[in-house]
Amino acid sequence: MRREQISAAVAALDVREVESQEMAWAQLRPLGFGVVPYLLDAYSTFRTWQGRCALMYYSTRYSRQSPSALGLGLLGLSDRSYMVRYRACGLLAYALNKEAVPALEQLAECEGRDLVLTSAKAAMNAIKAGNHNLFVDQRLSGQSSWTVNPGDAQQPVPSRVKRLMLGIQSVN
């Protein structure tokens, strides 16, 4: 695919209908993590919250390989849509990059929506523990896991002592 074709397919994600987004993504998915810089470039031009959510969602699987995905997640934390902020928290939780913690702390301090507040705290727990599953296992029960890519393994929840050392606590 040429740059123009990639940019056009990325622009097609900026719609409200999930089916249309999935058709556009079907063209982009074979590009792998190479598509993420295009998603980052398109973020500021997207008008629909659904489109910006799609950018976060589709970048999550590449967030450990692509610095652009980390940048996209950090941008998403300040989006006007709470759903985009929620998806950005998930992207950053999966990335497990400690550079995201200060931005997540800042979001948690000023966020009014419970969904985003708990997601920011859960993302920080995941990053501190090096265990992306803690984003969905907010009670630290060990009963929930999150598979983003094939091979994602269920990791044990850190012990109580380790949680104290890392500053991790149940979100719910």
Image (tube, grey):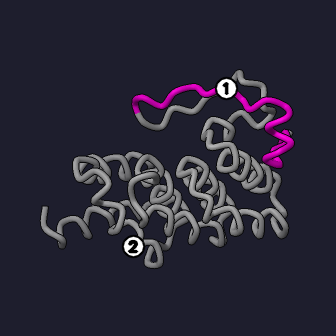
- Look at mark 1 in the image and give the residue it sits on: 156
Q: Is residue 137 magenta?
A: no
Please count the marks in the image.
2
Dividing the picture into quadrants, the one containing residue 15 is bottom left
- Which amino acid does the dot numbered 2 rest on? Ala
Q: 123 or 25: which is nearer to us?
A: 123
- Look at mark 2 in the image and give the residue it sits on: 42
Q: Residue at x 84, y 67 (%)?
A: 109
Q: Is residue 61 above or below residue 86?
A: above
Q: Residue at x 71, y 33 (%)?
A: 137
- Which amino acid does the dot numbered 1 rest on? Pro
- Quadrant where the C terminus is found in the figure: top right
- At which x and y percent is residue 33? 32, 54
Q: Residue at x 79, y 49 (%)?
A: 118
Magenta residues?
A: 150-171
- At which x and y percent is residue 168? 81, 45
* Label 2: few (<14), some (14–19) or many (≥20) C-alpha neighbours in 10 Å: some
- At which x and y percent is residue 7? 26, 70
Q: Residue at x 85, y 42 (%)?
A: 169
Can you name the residue that lies furthest to the left here? 2
* Label 1: few (<14), some (14–19) or many (≥20) C-alpha neighbours in 10 Å: some
Rounded to the nearest angstrom, the CA distance separating label 2 from label 1 is 37 Å
Q: Is residue 154 above or below residue 1?
A: above
Dividing the picture into quadrants, the one containing residue 142 is top right
20 vs 160, left or right, is left
Identify the element where label 1 is drawn: loop
Mark closer to the observer (2, 1): 1
